[in-house]
Amino acid sequence: GQNIDQPTEMTATEGAIVQINCTYQTSGFNGLFWYQQHAGEAPTFLSYNVLDGLEEKGRFSSFLSRSKGYSYLLLKELQMKDSASYLCAVRDEDTNAGKSTFGDGTTLTVKP
Amino acid sequence: EAQVTQNPRYLITVTGKKLTVTCSQNMNHEYMSWYRQDPGLGLRQIYYSMNVEVTDKGDVPEGYKVSRKEKRNFPLILESPSPNQTSLYFCASSLGTGLGDTQYFGPGTRLTVL
């Protein structure tokens, strides 16, 4: 099975940088996804990592270390609209690739 | 517009009354999945389908059934709903489960079982 841990809540200031960590223990691994979910809405895709290293997409970056079972999502130049829950999700290995496990989510509050 | 749709969006029902939540996608995706989300918890996978006529259990399948008779539709069936199935349900689809195939989520169905 999979176990994913991420902080429950974080607070940051508009214009700042925030890093949301995610650690996982898995029986299989075939990629790690980050999703953003605003209150009452559906999750939307932010970033994907399957190899070690940093993936950058505009203000958002995600890092993966498979040997450490660790990922982080980096949000730069924070805006008020970035206040949301951020979900870390791991896809299982090829033979079980239909299974996805999500963390409980990190609620980020951006303050003026 | 490429999308995943769910119906109904809101439903209040009583214990034991069978219900179906429909899910449909127009992106010709092979993979579809159902999740439930409860306060303070992340998404928990109920069932998934890799393709037509292929379904498998997720982490919390008890009390639910699914079918995949057509590629675009993946209904979630609660044969005898109970109050512990009160939750927010999301359907999702993706092209497949290959590298980078991200899931697209429907708008959610908020179910209350009294």
Image (cartoon, grey):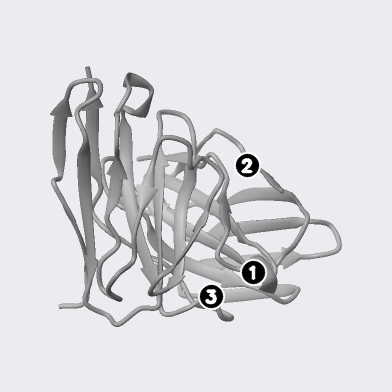
Image spot of residue A32 (x, y percent):
62, 64
Same chain assignment for discs 2 and 3: no
Position of residue A70 in the picture relative to residue A9 (left or right): right
Residue type at mark 1?
Answer: Gly
Q: Which residue is mark 1?
A: A31
Q: Which of A95/A88 is in front?
A: A95
- In front: mark 2 or mark 3? 3
Residue A6, numbered label: 2
Residue A38 visible: no
Residue type at mark 3?
Answer: Thr
Image spot of residue B3 (x, y percent):
22, 70
The relative height of residue B89 versus residue A45 in the rendered view (above or below) is above
Q: Which residue is mark 3?
A: B97
**Mark 3 residue element:** loop
Q: CA distance from mark 1 to mark 3?
A: 10 Å
Residue type at mark 2?
Answer: Gln
State which quarter of the image contains the C terminus of chain A. Answer: top left
**Mark 2 residue element:** loop
